[in-house]
Image (cartoon, helix red, strand yellow):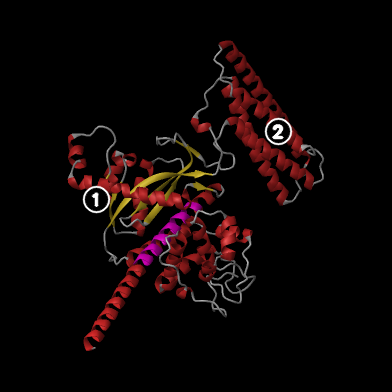
């Protein structure tokens, strides 16, 4: 049984619309909660958001029958809170059970004030979100923000588009430590499988892995030598090759032993054990690839092409990205392209898998204009330029700022040195503020696993940032309103005092 929010309030529960916040607090939590409160308190926005939230529940699950699940409103609150504050699930778990104002926003009253959120419950429910659902909610939130600012529905939008790297949660990759990762998983998983089916082949799995790791450490020690003596260098190189060969030989021997163990397991085993076997075989495939690349690189002296390399056996979507930034020679993750409006709201984003900036320029504008037809202009960096992009985007946008790469012709100079082009180009750097805010609120490094988890994490961060901006607008408006009220009150009291003095 899944509901967006309870049908009836409980005794002692404060209506979410009446929850009060400290408007002078500059922390992100009150701002996010003010944004969520505005969504809940605005009937049309709430209706649209609640309709979209229902899409994360399977059609087979009844809204009225069965065991109660976490309310969808609470999932939205906790999911955006985790990203906006850049917390892990352990921190979210503690705050969800102990933060008084948060529990009021979640809809807890006196009766269920002792309701306890389990850690695994939070993980399972937040992972129900899909990028598509989060993008729909984000579109509703952005339009609500424009409406709150007093913009007319037909007001034109001038966008800014840029990309940045979101790192995956991986260590620095080398072919030998990737092989160590693969062998560790193979040995651990085959030992667990043998234990479950009463096979004694891998009783010494801990000792087996220590043997592999000692050879790995030996290679690391040999590589640290800095001697400039040519004789010592030649001897060291020979020792390095021998150490790599011993490392490979032991890994191959263990892989052959794993294959022999898997051959003993009958095909009639349960689906769970068959899944475990497939997982073992996947890591064995990684190990064989790394063995092949080590042999080619170290023993045969071959250069491994970049497209053959894998940078993590756990987060296989990880890419090696060199953007030429000072002090950042490379980043391990994926590019994310974002498009913002003049007010800083993020209209659209796209995770770029094996894509460069020039490949996503047109799709970004197409998708954004489908949701926001008012977008009639956009500025880009040089990395997005190509002749085809310029022609296509010129047909879609009234105001296009797309600097050309390389040497400019006389016609290009006339365009790019024009007053309007230069003015818009200078304003383009404002998107760096939005990117920096995203990185400070969770999008510096993605801890979630798999490409699906990565995309969900990015979409949730974008949504949380826009809700926070919505809350910030409300906070500023309310603070100005209270200052005006205080000013009127002081004026009224002063006038009353003067009138009393005049009478006396």
Q: Which residues are magenta?
A: 457-476
Task: Answer whether residue 62 is magenta in the image.
Answer: no
Measured along the vertical axis of the image, is residue 169 above or below residue 327?
below
- Is residue 259 something one can see in this rendering? no
Horizontal and vertical percent position of residue 331: 47, 38
160 left or right of 329 in image: left
Q: Which mark is residue 365?
A: none
Rendered image quadrant of residue 284: top right
Measured along the vertical axis of the image, is residue 65 above or below residue 209?
below
Residue at point 32% right, 70% down? 483
Q: Earlier in the sequence, mark 1 or mark 2?
A: 2
Q: Quadrant of the C terminus?
A: bottom left
Q: Which residue matches tag 1?
A: 399
Residue at point 26% right, 46% down? 426
> Residues under labels 1 and 2: Cα distance?
60 Å
Residue at point 61% right, 64% down? 117
Horizontal and vertical percent position of residue 336: 43, 46
Horizontal and vertical percent position of residue 121: 62, 61
324 left or right of 317 in image: left
Rendered image quadrant of residue 464: bottom left
Q: Is 146 or 106 nearer to us in this picture?
A: 106
Q: Judging from the image, what secondary structure is the residue with disc 1 in?
A: strand
Horizontal and vertical percent position of residue 97: 59, 65
Task: Answer whether residue 463 is magenta in the image.
Answer: yes
Rendered image quadrant of residue 381: top left
> Mark 1, residues whose alpha carbon is within 10 Å: few (<14), some, or many (≥20)?
some
Q: Which residue matches tag 2?
A: 255
316 left or right of 41 in image: right
């Amino acid at each position: 049984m899944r509901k967006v929010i309870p049908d009836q309030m409980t005794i002692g529960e404060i209506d979410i619309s009446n929850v009060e916040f400290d408007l002078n607090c500059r922390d992100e939590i009150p701002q996010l909660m003010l944004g969520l409160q505005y969504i809940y308190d605005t009937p049309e926005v709430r209706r649209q958001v609640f309709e979209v939230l229902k899409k994360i529940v399977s059609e087979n699950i009844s809204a009225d029958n069965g065991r109660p699940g976490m309310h969808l409103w609470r999932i939205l609150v906790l999911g955006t809170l985790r990203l906006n504050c850049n917390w892990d699930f352990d921190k979210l778990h503690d705050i969800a059970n102990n933060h008084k104002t948060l529990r009021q926003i979640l809809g807890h009253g006196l009766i269920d004030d002792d309701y306890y959120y389990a850690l695994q419950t939070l993980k399972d429910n937040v992972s129900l979100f899909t990028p598509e659902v989060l993008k729909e909610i984000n579109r509703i939130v952005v339009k609500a923000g424009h409406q709150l600012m007093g913009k007319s529905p037909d007001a034109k939008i001038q966008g800014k588009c840029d990309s940045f790297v979101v790192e995956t949660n991986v260590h620095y990759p080398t072919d030998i430590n990737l092989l160590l990762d693969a062998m560790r998983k193979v040995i651990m998983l085959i030992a667990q499988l043998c234990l479950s089916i009463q096979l004694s082949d891998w009783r010494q799995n801990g000792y087996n892995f220590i043997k592999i790791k000692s050879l790995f450490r030996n290679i690391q020690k040999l590589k640290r030598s800095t001697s400039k003596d040519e004789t010592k260098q030649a001897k060291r190189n020979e020792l390095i090759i021998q150490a790599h060969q011993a490392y490979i030989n032991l890994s191959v021997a263990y892989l052959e032993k794993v294959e022999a163990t898997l051959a003993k397991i009958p095909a009639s085993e349960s689906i769970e054990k068959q899944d475990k076997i497939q997982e073992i075989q996947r890591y064995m495939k990684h190990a064989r690839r790394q063995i092949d690349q080590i042999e080619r690189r170290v023993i045969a002296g071959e250069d491994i092409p970049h497209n053959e390399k894998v940078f993590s056996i756990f987060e296989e979507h990880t890419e090696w990205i060199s953007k030429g930034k000072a002090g950042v020679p490379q980043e391990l993750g994926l590019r994310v392209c974002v498009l913002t409006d003049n007010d800083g709201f993020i209209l659209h984003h796209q995770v770029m898998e094996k894509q460069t900036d020039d490949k996503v320029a047109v799709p970004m504008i197409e998708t954004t204009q489908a949701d926001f037809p008012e977008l009639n202009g956009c500025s880009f960096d040089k990395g997005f330029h190509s002749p085809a992009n310029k022609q296509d985007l010129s047909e879609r946008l009234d105001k296009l700022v797309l600097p050309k790469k390389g040497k400019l012709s006389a016609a290009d100079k006339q365009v790019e040195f024009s007053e309007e082009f230069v003015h818009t180009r200078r304003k383009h750097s404002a998107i760096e503020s939005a990117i920096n805010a995203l990185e400070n609120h969770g999008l510096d490094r993605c801890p979630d696993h798999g490409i699906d988890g990565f995309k969900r994490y990015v979409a949730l961060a974008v949504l949380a940032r826009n809700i926070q901006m919505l809350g910030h607008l409300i906070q500023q408006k309310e603070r100005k309103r209270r200052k005006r009220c205080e000013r009127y009150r002081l004026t009224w009291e002063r006038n009353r005092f003067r009138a009393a003095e005049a009478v006396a």
